[in-house]
Amino acid sequence: MFNLNSRLVKELPEGMGFVQRGLYYADSLFETIRVFQGRIPLMARHWARLSRGLGLMGYDVPADWSGAFFEQEILRIAPGNARVRLTVWRSSGGLFNPENNTPQFLIAAQALESDGYEWLSRGSRLGFCKSVRLPLDDYSGLKTLNAGRYVAAAQEAEAKGMDDVLILNASGHVCETTNSNVFWLEEDTLCTPPLTDGCVTGVMRELLLALTNAGGYVIKEKSATFADLLAADEVFLTNAVRGIRWVRECEGKVFESSRTAAVYELLVSHFSQKNS
C-alpha cells in the first residue's frame, strides 16, 4: 500500500508511474528551456542532448519524438516568454532493472517578463563548495533527477550568502556550479572545463564555444583547480535560461568584466539575427 497525499492506495493511480521511477530511482531526464516571444532558438540543441541521454539510459524513444515535436508541445502552453521544464521519465514497472523503457513526459512553464537575455550589472558572488564532489563517469553530463548533490551545494551557497558555488569533481578540478557551466579568461584565451571533467553538457556552453570560435577567439578546454580559477582575469557562468552571468567576486577575489561583456554582446547579436 501507498500513502499518497494522505490517502492509502494499493497501487499507483494510472498515469502516476513517474512517482515510482522518479522517486525510487531518479532515472529520469529533464531540460530547462527558454522561450523568447514564442520562439525556442535552442530547441534543436536541447533535443540533441535529451535524445543522447535517452539513448544512453536505454529508453525506447518514440518515432514521433523530435525537436519539432517538443517545440510544438511547449508552445501550446508557453506561447510568449517563459522558462520551461521538460521532464522525461521511464514508464512504471520493475525494480532497478526496468520492465518498460517507454518514456513519458511532462511540460511545466513559468511566465517571464523579459523577452531576451539580460546583463547582470552587479555581477555574481561565488563561493567554493566544500560539501560536494561530483562523480566522473559516462553519465556525468546528463541532466537527471538525481540532483541531491546540487541541492546540497545550493543550500551551502545560501548559508554563505553567495549567489552560487563552484563545485569540484572527484579529481579536485573545477566542474560547474549548481546550475551553470563555467568559463574564464586567461589573457586572450577563453577557457572552460572539458566534458571529461564531468560537467553537464550545457546547450549554452556548446553554443558559446561555436560562436566564439567563429569570432576568432582562442579557446581552450582545460582542467583547472580552484586556485587556477582564482588566478583568472575574468570568470562567467552560462546556462540556457539566463545566458551569461559575469562573476564579480569569488572568495575575496574581484574580477573584471569587460571581455565577458564582449562575449555577451556576441551572444545577444546572434539571437537578434535569429529572431530577425
Image (cartoon, rainbow, N blue to C red):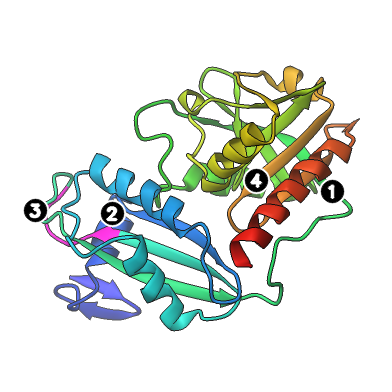
Residue at mark 4 to residue at mark 3: CA–CA distance: 37 Å
- Dot 4 or dot 1, earlier in sequence: 1
Q: CA distance from mark 2 to mark 1?
A: 39 Å
Residue at 36% x, 61% y: name it.
67
Q: Amino acid at mark 2?
A: Tyr
- Residue mark closest to the camera, 4 vs 1: 4
Precedes in sequence: disc 2 or disc 4:
2
Which residue is denoted by mark 3 in the rendering?
Answer: 99
Q: CA distance from mark 2 to mark 4?
A: 31 Å
Q: Earlier in the sequence, mark 4 or mark 3?
A: 3
Q: Is residue 107 magenta?
A: no
Q: Which residues are magenta?
A: 89-95
Q: Which mark is residue 24?
A: 2
- Label located before the other in sequence (2 or 1): 2
Task: Identify the secondary structure beneath mark 3.
Answer: loop
Residue located beneath label 1 in the image = 123
Which quadrant of the structure image shows residue 126?
A: top right
Mark 4 lies on a secondary structure that is strand
Q: Amino acid at mark 4?
A: Thr
